[in-house]
Amino acid sequence: MAKKKNVAKRTLARRNEKRAERDNRMPRSSLAQVSRSPQAFFAQQLPALLRALAEEPRLLGPEMWPTSFDEMQLLTLVRGPANLDDAIKWRAAVLLYHSARLNRFHECAERFQAALLTRDAIKGDEILARIREEFGVSLWWLRSRLQLAALCGGLASLREAAAHAEGETSEGLQICASLFSSKLDPDSSLNDFAYTVDRTLALGANRQTILAQKIVEYFRFQVDSLDLLRSVDPFDLLAFGSRLPAIDQYMMFLALAQRICTTTGAIGTAALRRSIGHLAGAFSDVRFGLLATLLSSDGTRTLPIPPSRLVTAIDGYTRGDYDTVVSLCLGEIDGGTCAFEFYELCAKSLFFIERSPIVLASEADGLSRRILAALHEVLKQDRDVANAIVTLEKCACLLEGSRFASQLNAFLKMQSRAVTACNSSRYFLLNSCCVTPRFVEISSRPYVREKILQDLSAHWPSSPSIRLFSRGADMVLDVEPVRSLKYSARLAATEGRHEDAIQTFSGALTQARPDTPMYFEIADALFASYISTNRQCEALLLLVNTYGRRPPLFAGLLIADLLRPGYRRSVFKHIFSRLEWPLAFRILAAAGEGSSSDVNRRQYGAYADFLASHGATRPTQLAYREWAARNPGFKFVSFLRFVCVPEVMDSSVAFENSEEIERERITICQTLLEIDPTNGDTYAQEIARRTQTMAVRRALNYLGDSKIYVDTDGVVRALEPTFRMGFERFLKMRELSQRHRRIVVMRSVENGSRIVVDFRDLAQETFEELFLELKNRFISSNEFGLDSYLSVRLRHGTLSAQIRRCFERDKLITQRNATTNEYEPNMEWIDRLALSPTDDKRSVYSDAFRRFAHAVDAAISEVIKQWIQIRSDATPTGMFDFNYRDEDITAVYKSVGLMKEFDSFVSVCLAELWKRTEVSLARIRERLNSELRRRLSEALAALESDVGPGFRECLSALKRATAQCRTELSHDLDAIVSWFRRSDTTSVPDYEIQQLTETAIEIVRNCHPQVRFSPAVDVPRNSRVLGRFFSAFVDVLFIVFDNVVRHSGSMEPKVQFRLSFLRNTVELSVTNVLSVEASARLTPEKLEQIRDLAGASSTARDSIRFEGGTGFVKLRKLLFYDLKRAEEAELKVKLLDGGATFQVLMQVSSGGLFV
Amino acid sequence: MRILVVEDDDLKRKTLVQFIIERLGGVTLAEGRSFQSGMKEVVATTPDLILLDMSIPTFDHSPVEPGGRVRAFGGLDFLEELSRLEIETKVIVVSQFDSFGGGKETQTLEELCRRMKTEFPELFCGSVFYQSSETAWRAALSAQMTLLGLGRDA
């Protein structure tokens, strides 16, 4: 049995050998093998693959050097290598096969990059033409064509070139051309481009398949090779791109190899290592050599050495010979060098000689100088850094496809600390122009580092830079001191001597100039050392002190990492008393790390910790002058300015209300005015704005307190002289004896003939006449009475708007159509709730919302038309009950007693009337609180129930809206209930006209939350209206503004309000544009009617106490009587601009109105 | 046993108070209508349990106080402050909304609960979705309170 098994084994082995021999045989069998067993073919080693290619070029497939775009094949979906290693080997074999030609291409491509950098359009054109002639077309060529057009010809040239390219037949090519041109559009940002890519590659319904998603990622990689934020799948990309032109396969392979080697934790497989090794030997492209150096397992790789001029520049920088460095580098840059290293050295050196790059005058200047200037701005790390980064990103796009662009792009990612899918600093180094001393940082393996430095030393034995990396600063003399400290510290850190590193870095930091890149490099390295040794507090302090004055993007991510949600607060306990603690959260907020609510929350915690550690509960409790003296510089100012803001402070229980917080903030701004006068304007503006807001809020409170009002002075004045005469008569009556005062009054006739009489007191009768006369005026005087004020300040629109506004804000309620008297359908909610335009539930929803609107308005109407009325025969349900029975009048008569003074008499009577008013007010408050609240709540509940089950998410949204409305309505009803108290206007201070205007505007906005009401206001500053005219003034403006909102026909009415003084008069003009419909409604008859209402004779009309079309009557009353202008007021309405503009013009005498 | 109800909706707050009285009887009840009044009560009396709304105003509304900043995630603010002050009071979030915030900052009640469990494991006990027109919330709140060892089931 065992013998049989052995025989079988030997037979199988022999069969496999023969198969292998067969597979390794040449030409025709290779093609056959690929089609029969591709996996086996591609599994061969690289030399075998290369041999197969050499003998059978047909293995390459379609033309790899297409002469026209028609011949290009962008996307391949045929079977190829089965795994990444095989795909890498195969691609390497293909590239090696074409290496001679690709090397020539590479030389041309480098010259093309130089032409772009020097903006030499002619040379660029020539090179591209030659490339096309010799190497055919490719995606690289297409993009370069567009880059040249964009750089040298501008947008028009770019679009011309893109249109030409988009006319090519292949759809894939059209997509690429379109996206290339979008990216190069000078007016388009990279965010716009990202959006365009997403939109273009959306794939619609097919996007859900895995294959579709992979194809999208493939195209994304082709059009945006600079995107280091997204991870890539190299295997898919190689597979899909296996039929690309040779040039594109070369570019793609390099980019993917770099991505593989810079992905965290990965360093590539043996297959990659060997392939790169072969390629480095065959290709002149330095990137292969750099990759090979990185991947070399024994460090024996021969390095691409730097040119002497670069070494001179590097050494000059190391020694501190900055002038020489700048001159040398500028020469290289202007000559079109593709070595980013020269740009970096030049930009950094400029900091030490305090010379900015030549300011680029216009777009006509070269790209190289633009890059240098922007690079310098980025390294400066001040407020222009964001713009500079954007400029450099666009420059990288203009050079995309080149090593320079990849290096520049990686540099930007490092500077902005972007979270990339690969290691940006390693990616940066892999795109260097050569191996410089800095390249040792690419590997943590000591023998690789040593080999690199040895090779460099062999070529440049006297280079201080190389020695610096080798031995630290100890044995290197001609090095700038701070730099030598920095390298010593780095060496210590690399060797794991972190405490030494920290000490040395700290020393270097104190000596380095704060405005230089080296300072930040040292700070970054020190930060890394602190983190390595778990010294989070020191790390945080360092970040804030280094970057606190800089744009937050530099420190934001690092701080976010230290303070990520769930961090242990106790770790930072002993820096709670340091300003850096709250400032760290300020940097987080400014960097946009986290949502605004999260940021405020965490900021508050740090702020409270800080204050508590100094025994304070409010910022103003800190002795700020001492603090400012002890903390010169930005920290204390930043703390007060950015941390001590209402959104942070309002979580502290040290404050009782919003106004206290506003006051605290105003005091803080006043402090800042003193200790930070440079930004005085900013603080002054903030103080003015907050003061205004507080004034408006107070004004609104005063207005709320003054709704229930009677102008008792006016009432009494209007009664003169007859009332006084009546009072005199009453006094005389009272002096008579009882017998003489007695009068007989017939009470009734009984049984047909029996007369029943009452005996009355004549004095009391006289009193009753006087009292009822006063009562009548108190209630019903058009100019001064209660009912008139109830109409102007409550019934005319204020009450209705206050109740409706929460429903309008959430769009639960619509308006009634003036023509049909039906409610407009609530399309906002119907469309959200209905499943489709033909959903038959739409009519159910429509009816539900109509019923709701009706229920709300019916409740409001009842309150206005029945409750807030004076009880009478016409309004029997009115809740202001001034019906006096005989015994009530007798009681009042007795309270007058033997009073002889007219004023006292009137006071007692008015007191009684106010007492009666307050009884009525109490009843109204109770009814509003109970019945109105209940009805509106029931209306909301009915709406929810009537709507029934709708589309689940939208029903949830409706429930949300109704729940929010309930809460807001409760607050609004509380406010309304508080209106029904007797007003006290004696304590109203004088107000600036600006503030009065803002108050009226605020009221209109509150009443009409869906309308964008922002009138242009032109009023004199520093003019103050006397406090006692405050309410009336606001009422005037409110009526006019409210009128505009209701009748202009626009949701964003264009309004202008102007107040001006002309000698002894003040003119108020409100002008608004009418919509076409509104203009059509304002017929000549209607205008005449309005004028009539506004006319002189209308004041006496009872219509003032009614609602609906009586605004101008009320306006006139306010101008004449409330502002006490009597006959010195004019009210006009006009149509201007051929009927397109409506104007209300008011002129009143200014005397006694203003301070 | 001290229980604090922090809720700005009057009807909901009264309903919760009534529920507690019915269920637990002799407890000391306190009410807060905003972040501030709730937090002041906590600092003054250190309740044993807080029934907390998620979205609350900063200050109590009144005719002269518009309420300050509306805190969509006021419940989180409250928990954070309890944690900072090292106050070990149990909290049950009772909300009538199932999502909070707006735009990119929108979070569902479920997401917030997961977050609160992670960030405040010693304080946060759970959440109850409240609907005035339904009674399921009663059983849910009862169950939460039973887990805390508070009184009989509803």
Image (cartoon, rainbow, N blue to C red):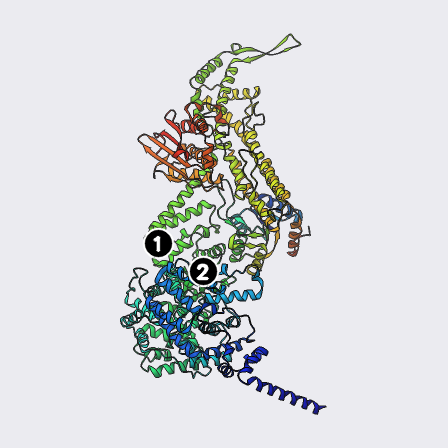
Image height check: is B7 above or below A400? above
In the depicted view, which residue is nearer to us: A27 or B28?
A27
Chain letter for mark 1: A
For badge 1, the amino acid type reads Arg
Farthest residue toward the top?
A753
Label 2 to label 1: alpha-carbon separation: 51 Å
Q: Quadrant of the C terminus of chain A?
A: top left
Dot 2 surroundings within 10 Å: few (below 14), some, or many (20 or more)?
Answer: some
- Closer to viewer: mark 2 or mark 1: 2
Residue for badge 1: A625
Which residue is at a point 42% across and 43% down the rendered structure image? A693
Looking at this view, name the residue that lies furthest to the right: A1
Chain letter of the residue beneath label 2 in the structure image:
A
In the figure, is residue A837 to the left or right of A1067?
A: right
Per the rendering, the mark at residue A193 is 2
Front residue (pair A1092, A897): A1092
Label 2: state its secondary structure: helix
Pinpoint residue B143: horizontal percent, then vertical percent. 66, 54
Q: Residue at 32% of width from left, 32% of height from top?
A: A1062
Relative vertical location of residue A37 with respect to residue A12 in this rendering, above or below: above
Image quarter for residue A926?
Answer: top right
Which numbered tag is attached to residue A649?
none
